[in-house]
Amino acid sequence: MSQVKSGLRLAGLTLVFFGIAGLFFAGVNYSFFPAGHSRALGLVFLIISAPVMVVTMNRWVKVLAGLLALAVLNGVISISTGHLLANPTQPMSRLDVLYITVFFAVAAALASTLRGRKLNPVDRIAVLAFVSSLALLMEYEGMHGRPGAPLAGTDFTLMGIGLGCLLVAWGYDRLQRRRGRNLPGHHVRGPAGSPADPT
């Protein structure tokens, strides 16, 4: 019975996660690309979804790298076939797909460094900014992308911003770890658990 309850709880949390993510992406779409939608409604969606995403980030950031890795796999298949995996009738430049695949690969590598630690405020801001840039990239392509058209400067700008945000989180964590090792009283411990001999 406990396993059934655990499974139902996991399924419920997964549905809530996708619901909040959908609300966030819809908020970005309505706010920045209204096109018949209410911009005010988009802001309401963002006000509701963004705080929830920040509060629960320690949970869903663990699967972020996996989702980005799936995008890399999608890109590799698209490079080999020459068209989008989701739409076999729509051709796409292999070079553009390569750019996108490299973007997702680097993002997945950086996001994987977030899984093994508790997120600090810089991490939360950086990850939310990355997800926002990813949402903007997807919505921009959906609104302005044309079948077979090359990537525009806006695409590369948004990809650069997204990777920059994750690099800030990675760099800040490395800096904090280095400072922690240099604090007074921090000792490297020997194999037996005793402080190592400085000489």
Image (cartoon, rainbow, N blue to C red):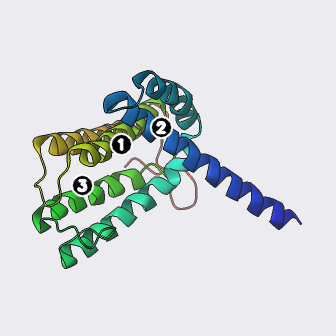
In the depicted structure, whether residue 153 falls above or below residue 64: above
What amino acid is labelled 3 in the image?
Phe
Residue at (50% x, 48% y) in the render: 61
Relative to residue 120, is residue 98 depicted above or below? Answer: below
Callout 2, which amino acid? Phe
Q: Are marks 2 and 1 in contact (CB under 8 Å)?
A: yes
Whether residue 180 is visible = no
Q: Position of residue 118 (x, y in %)?
A: 54, 42
Secondary element type, mark 1: helix
Q: Quadrant of residue 65?
A: bottom left
96 relative to 75 in the view: left or right: left
| Disc nearer the start of the sequence (1/3) | 3
Does residue 81 appear to the left or right of 186 in the view shown? left
Looking at the image, which is closer to me, 84 or 36? 36
Q: Residue furthest bottom?
A: 80
Residue at mark 3: 103
Write the residue at 41% across / 55% down: 112
Residue located 51% across and 24% down the image: 44
- Residue 24 tag number: 2
Q: Quadrant of residue 128?
A: top left
Q: Of helix, strand and loop, which one carries label 3? A: helix
Q: Position of residue 156 (x, y in %)?
A: 16, 45
Mark 2 against mark 3, which lies toward the viewer? 2
Structural distance between the alpha carbons of marks 2 and 1: 8 Å
Q: Tell me the quarter of the picture where residue 88 sits.
A: bottom left
